[in-house]
Amino acid sequence: MDAVSRYCREDVLRILRVPVRQLVAWERAGLIGSSEMYSFDELVQLRKLRDLTATRISVKSIRRSVDAMQKVSGMVNPLLESVAVGHGTRLRFRQWGALVDPMTRQMAFDFELAHGGGMAVVRRRAQEISAGIAEVQEMFQRAVRLEEIPGRLDEAKVVYETILEMQPGHAAAAINLGTIRYNERDFAGAERLYRRATVSDPEYALAFFDLGNVLDEQQRMDEAVTAYQRALALVPQYADAHYNLALAYERMKEPRKALRHWTIYMRLDPSGPWASHARGQAKKILGSERLAIVTRHGRTMRIAG
């Protein structure tokens, strides 16, 4: 087997930018097998889990929806064999040209993939639409694979660009291409792609997080803070967003606001690779906050100076 088709645990965490605790949570829920080495298909599945978890859908709800879809469709792995779409607190799956809710066993009209004509249009175009979805899925997986092969990044960019021409609302392709632009220090290009992803999927916390990162790089701190706050409004337990928001507040000389997010980050990811830095920053802020004693209305009070 090619070296590029197997990924060690550390590589997976680096590529997906997820904390260890998140990977462990998916393993405990049975959404991915516990392993020290992962295949390419498993990497694709983990990327989907990351994207779904960056919405309001819990790991437990993803597990229930996947189980239900397996029973309804006979699929072995619905996360790889169909397109999972967040809907409220659970998942729908794109199949047969419609959105399938496996919990209720109902099919809903897919406004994103078919425009006008009602369900008759969906049925008539089902084969064509399903083929198009499968083609885009295969292209997306190919682009992800190309990213990991030295010297083939330009090919990956072309594939992502083609996907966005075929399906302009493909938020994941916009984010991945945006991250390539970001790493190339094309911050304006990355920002356009991240903003495109936030418009395509306003519930996609990762898109707002990445947008915050590129705005931070451009020293547009007020806008970066707004983007991070939006990511946290969608997913309050988003540890990395708390970390980066704390950094942003420190750069803006607002240590007390930073302290709050350092503290939350330490609670969410106490043993992660950046936990020690968060603890150090929190300690430094607390140490710099001098206490003053004043008398007011005849009472002695202690306030932060």
Image: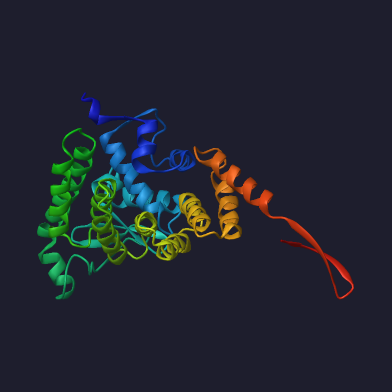
On the picture, is 23 further left or further right than 289?
Answer: left
Q: In which quarter of the image is residue 76?
A: top left
Total numbered labels placed on residues in the image: 0
Q: Give percent across and percent down for residue 84.
A: 30, 54
Q: Nearer the viewer, residue 27 or 104?
A: 27
On the picture, is 302 further left or further right than 154?
Answer: right
Q: Give percent across and percent down for residue 267.
A: 59, 47
Image quarter where the C terminus lies is bottom right
Q: Which of 192 and 81 is in front in this view?
A: 192
Q: Give percent across and percent down for residue 176.
A: 26, 50
Identity of the residue drawn at 28% across and 42% down: 44
Q: Residue furthest right?
A: 298
On the picture, is 294 further left or further right than 156?
Answer: right
Check the image and tell me how it is coloured. Answer: rainbow
Relative to 250, is 199 above or below? below
Image quarter where the N terminus lies is top left
Q: Give percent across and percent down for residue 77.
A: 30, 43
Q: Nearer the viewer, residue 259 or 254?
A: 254
Q: Nearer the viewer, residue 98 or 182?
A: 182
Identity of the residue drawn at 72% across and 55% down: 290
Q: Which residue lies furthest to the top in this view?
A: 1
Identity of the residue drawn at 44% across and 54% down: 61
Relative to 273, is 104 above or below? below
